Amino acid sequence: MHDEPGPTVLITGVTGQDGVYLSRLLRRRGARVVGVAPPGAVPPDLCAAYLAEVEVVTLDICEADDVRGLVDAVRPDEVYNLAAVSSVARSWAEPDLTFAVNHRAVETLVFALLELRDRTGHEARFFQASSAEVTGSAAHSPYAEAKAAAEEVVRQARDRRGLHACSARLYNHESPLRTETFVTGKITRGAAEIAAGARTELRLGNLDVSRDWGFAGDYVDAIARMVGLDEPQDLAIGTGTVHRLADLLEVAFAAAGIDDPSAYVVTDPELVRPADTAVLVADPEPAAAALGWRATTSFEDLVRHMVAVDQERIRTGVEHDLRYLDGSARLEQ
């Protein structure tokens, strides 16, 4: 008797934080994973460390013909669209690119799956990574507007065309894979470098914003559970606990052995967003009821782990290592 083969899964944005954690989760469950990354943006050391069992394809998801060709060739059972212009600040600088990636590419993927079904009878399930930013006072940023438009694409495909499609409004979630282009990664790397004597200051914008921060490794479990539901539904994914950015700063510096970060932080008005939501926090109960899921990693443990990994990077010079994903205790081995 042979085991049934696992599903074939297509993940866009596979080299990003969520793509890495999700692809590894699904590979452990026996799935064949095909990952999509934009041309010229496939870090060899990242792929070697985290994606050795993933079939990585370079493709511009804004090129509709290429996307349709890939869907036809792969015939996925599940598609997770994680690719995005993921920075609100960048969306103000590049609104056209933001709408192309965060909205029109979603249309292309959904239509490609519908065309495949209509032509061959092959059914696929679709997940769209949306954002809590669509609900906040910054909802008129190009980022939030594009994400909201993509949510509507998913609803229409589900309600009018019967596609098993869902979207999750993901609240802020982090991991040691966050780069310094994100404020969380900037803070944890900055704290580690200041503690190591490699720098003397950290330039930041508004520290008064409050967010619901969780661990990406927890969130991809919720994402996979959403796709596994018999009846698709849209959900918010978050911890339900809110912290200020100033709290994150304090925990990060304390983890690096510095009691008072204020001596090292410089407020830079140029880093303040044109529009920002003061507070974003999820109601975790609908996801708990639908999925049996709750976040398990605390805010403090998440930030400490990120700092520990950044300290290890400084010590070893190794940017990507499998140990970094699974807990700071392993760094001591």
Image: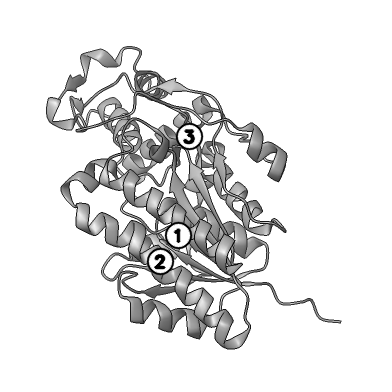
Name the element at disc 2.
helix
Looking at the rendered image, the disc whose residue lies closer to the viewer, 3 or 1, is 1
Name the element at disc 3.
helix
Q: Which mark is residue 305?
A: 3
Taking the image as shown, residue 56 lies to the left or right of residue 124, namely left
Query: Residue 276 appears at what percent x and percent y?
Result: 28, 30
Residue that extends furthest to the right in the rendered view of this protein: 1
| Disc 1 and disc 2 in contact, CB within 8 angstroms | yes
With respect to residue 253, does 130 lie above or below? below
Query: Residue 235 appears at what percent x and percent y?
Result: 58, 44
The residue that label 2 is drawn on is 107
Looking at the rendered image, the disc whose residue lies closer to the viewer, 2 or 3, is 2
With respect to residue 141, does 249 lie above or below? above
Query: Residue 90 appears at what percent x and percent y?
Result: 22, 46
Q: Which mark is residue 153?
A: 1
Q: Which mark is residue 258?
A: none
Q: Residues within 10 Å of mark 1 (few under 14, many from 20)?
A: many
